[in-house]
Image: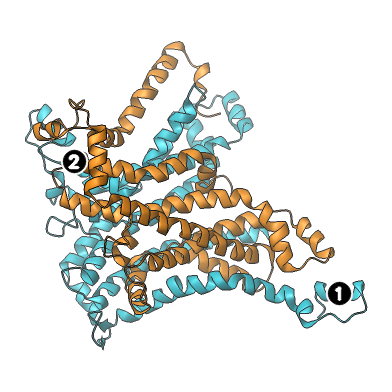
Chain colours: A cyan, B orange
Amino acid sequence: MSTPAAALGTSRAAVPASWWTRHQRAIAPWLFLAPALLMFGLYVIWPIFESIGISLYDWDGLGTPKFIGLDNYRELTTDPDFFVALKNNLIWLVGFLLAVPAGLFLALFLNQTVFGIRAVKSLFFFPFVISQVVIGLVFTWFYNPANGIVGNLFALVGMEPVSVLSDERYVTYGIVIAGLYPQVAYCMILYLTGLNNIRPDLIEAARLEGAKGWAMLWHVVLPQLRPATFIAVVVTIVGSLRSFDMVSIMTSGGPYGTSRVLAYYMYEKALSEYGYRMGYGTAIATVLFAIMLVYILFVLYRIYQQEKDMA
Amino acid sequence: MFPTPIEKVSAPTRALYKAGLPVSLLLWLLPIIAVALTSIRGQGDIASGNYWGWPTQWQIVENYTAVFRNTPILRYIGNSFLVTIPTVIGAVALACLAGFALGVYRFKMNLVVFFLFVGGNFVPFQILMVPVRDMSLRLGLYDSITGLVLFHVAFQTGFCTFFMRNFIRDLPMELIEAARIEGASEVQIFWRVVLPLVRPALAALSVLVFTFIWNDYFWATVLIQGDHAMPVTGGLKSLNGIWVAQWHLVSAGSIVAALPPVLVFFLMQKQFIAGLTLGATKG
């Protein structure tokens, strides 16, 4: 088979092309890929398999690991704390998805051209730029029953303040609300970009036909915002399953572990004063990974479809 | 344009909108305004429970000097820069090479490798935690800035490669073909043809990665133990543990910690948003 490079070589001169000239177009991509593949393989791809392997062992991180088969997973099925974490992840998932309509609402609210709107838009986006540690701290103060804003509000209507973060009925919802704050800002910016690229002719045509308000939004605008919605949903789901920072900062999983999520529970089992149970920790991580894999495959399938259309 | 431009609606609605805009902005930013106000309060306000009202004492200078003098926050900030900047350079450099390979060449495994980067970028951190920590320990990189940087570079390469590959693939391929006909080698094509064209993408990617890494908290707690290498996110968390009732000092620390990414965002807003919303308009 003659490669274009070889053909090029023969047409230019009678000098026989070197091995490198003939093959560089086949080898070059792998040389360009090598550093990235090496790092990504070493630190991301390989550890996934290693973790799944470790989950079959009883290991404190120092001594000799002992193979115990699926015992860690069997223990998970009877571990009430695991199910609390799993249930909280579900609350996170559902609650976090509110960021998508809320972000759309904000984007629609801000999609105007009044004086200073650019500055207003970037200030609305502000919470996303700031570290979750800071957001978590402020919301912890908000929820403080003695001096927090939420406590003051309860006092205002003459009710006994609820201590959101030390009440196991409300704690997870309280953290999810804090987590929503930057996430809504993220979804808003996705939708603002989407709205910017909407086709004005379609909007005008629909207006002439008498469409407005909800009908317009539902039938004309939202279909055009589909790429933005897709990304917003994906990043929100991934974010909800990754939730760790807020839980760690606001409650450290408490009270009595009732606000743990899988990501936090895993960390606690593997790396904290509760003991170094690497095997059990990685078993929890493997469950979390399996849940995430559903979304990863869904995203990859969609990208695959797009690639096929473009090819 | 949707919704209906505000100039075209009735005068009362328009007035309502223009008045509602600053009010809603104020409400939305309440958490951040609260931190900013608390960071300049005096001890008296904190003691008397005036957490949310207007400060009665203004102690801007006192609080901020106290944070810098009495805590290792300067150290933490320095560490954050030492982690963030090499990570940005490393991840973007690797992604340029990989994105070039995946965006320009057609070869059998192209899509498989691409999917590896995209999929890997979504995995939960916890599935990597134990092996990465273990490997860092064995390499003597645990509790060191180098160890944290190496992990961040590797992980960010996933997202960055995705980004660069899509950008490079949208470049006009005729330019590359033309360079080949002129006899340019593959390295020359990368260096002289493609790299100058991807500059806007490099800017967007750099500001995004800067913010992501600056705000990272999980890996800072997993891979770093001592103050000597602790980035500011983990540092703030431990300061908050030490100064439970000193909200004004913790707030001042928070503002200092938030400043670099906020500045980067405001200086490079266009690139930041362009990077973040990549793909939100097509596909």
Answer with left or right where residue A99 lies relative to residue A284.
right
B107 up-or-down from B104: above or below: below
Is residue A122 visible in the rendered structure shown here? yes
Q: Secondary structure at mark 2?
A: helix
Q: Horizontal and vertical percent for residue A162?
A: 11, 40
Quadrant of the frame with the N terminus of chain A? bottom right
Under tag 1, what secondary structure?
helix
Q: Position of residue A250 (x, y in %)?
A: 21, 50
Tally of marks: 2
Residue holding disc 2 = B247
Mark 2 vs mark 1, foreground winner is 2
Query: Which residue appears at 30% of the width and 61% of the height?
Result: B228
In which quadrant will I find the C terminus of chain A? bottom right
Closer to us: B166 or A63: A63
At horizontal 29% and vertical 74% (from top left) the residue drawn is A282
- Whole-Å distance between the Cαs marked 2 and 1? 72 Å
**Mark 1, residues whose alpha carbon is within 10 Å: few (<14), some, or many (≥20)?**
some
Residue at mark 1: A9
Q: State the residue in front, B236 or A110.
A: B236
Coordinates of residue A210 in the picture (x, y in percent): 55, 24
Residue sitting at x 76%, y 60%: B176
Question: Along the horizontal axis of the image, is A275 left or right of A10?
Answer: left
